[in-house]
Image (cartoon, rainbow, N blue to C red):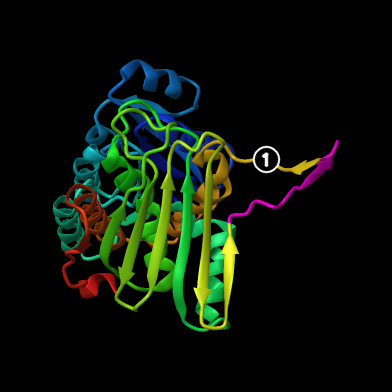
Amino acid sequence: MTQHAPLGIAVVGTGKMGADHVRRINDVISGARVTAVVDVDAERVKAIAAGIEGCTAYTDPAAAMAADDVDAVLIASPGFAHEAALLAAFTHDLPVLCEKPLTPDAASALRVLEAEQKLGHRRVQVGFMRRYDAEYLKLKALLDSGELGRPLMVHNRHRNASVPPGYVNANLINDSVVHEMDVTRWLLGQEITAVTVLRPRPSSNAPEGLDDPQFVVFETDGGAIVDVEINVNCGFGYQVQAEAVCERGSARIGEAHDLLVNTAGRWGGSIAQDFVERFVDAYDREVQAWVDATRRGEVTGPSAWDGYAAAAVCEAGVRSQNEGGRVEVELIERPAFYR
């Protein structure tokens, strides 16, 4: 890549998230273009590549990363494939934006941390997009200012209209509450030390065998208590809301009051139907920030450490689901490399 040439990006995984990133890079953000698309579905990537000038289709991530026109990698494949793709990117010293999870478990995430540290510099930004959402950014700035005093509690609501077939209890933690795990650590600047999962009587909307909704409680090393209502079959839409309760006040986001309509004896607005719609601006900011930093020769945003910490908290959450009660998070001491 020359100084003024667009960043050539290989998008690994072209499902819902990957395809949306291909669109984003080509049509929304600046300074980059998709030069490679990778998926095990050869026909799908051929079709995608055919619609993008100068884009090559691959079924092997390592082959795409070895191409001369690939300067960076965006990983949007299923989580179980992330470790191999990340290690392949490290082989070519390529910057990576890796959608969450970094890897599906803490042990494999630690292997990624060790491999990145051997490079001697950061290469990974993890795709925790809420850190780029306008409302979360305002809440973070307010908490950091100290205006409201020390945060004491955070209340979160995370609701999906429905979930696809095959969604199981562990997905509630690993695919959904993981976002609250990361945003808690980021908003408060604290590590989560313990997780407790409580289960009310399941909703009649929940598929057979899925205990939905659930109520998750985090404890942090700064003495805060954080709760999450996770309700993935609410039926009416996608909602993400958070309220920080501090010593001198509280602050709430996610009410979606940007448009309130009064008509025919009714009032109301619209509710987003999925995460792509709700966080479209956050995804745009996230990818643009990653491209801009990469072009400057920098790596910013959530690190591989953040991905590892989230994986460790997820493991405690799943254990609490399965065994009941409070489960402490097993976390290594944070390496100086990630401080």
Whether 28 is drawn above or below 162: the answer is below
41 or 199: nearer the eye?
199
The chief SS type of the magenta part is loop
Which residue shows up at 15% across the image and 60% down it? 114
For mark 1, what is the residue?
A: 270
Q: Is residue 170 left or right of residue 129?
A: left
- Compared with residue 27, is residue 87 higher up or lower down, i.e. above or below? below
Quick check: 126 left or right of 142?
A: left
- Sort mark 1 into few (<14), some (14-19) or many (20+) by Cα contacts within 10 Å: few
Percent x, y of residue 23 = 52, 34
The percent coordinates of residue 126 (x first, y second) are 35, 53
Residue 183 occupies quadrant: bottom left
Q: Residue at x 54, y 64 (%)?
A: 137
Residue 286 is situated, as x and y percent measured from the top left of the image, at 49, 53
Q: Amino acid at mark 1?
A: Ser
Image-based side of 286 in relation to 127, left or right: right
Q: Residue furthest top?
A: 43
Residue in the image at 47% along x and 62% along y: 155
Residue 262 forms part of the magenta stretch: yes
Decide if residue 297 is in sight here. no
Q: Nearer the viewer, residue 20 or 186?
A: 186
Give the magenta-colored segment's residue range: 254-265
Residue closer to the observer: 27 or 233: 233
Q: In percent of the image, x 27 and y 70: which residue is there?
A: 338
- Does the segment drawn in magenta span residue 21? no
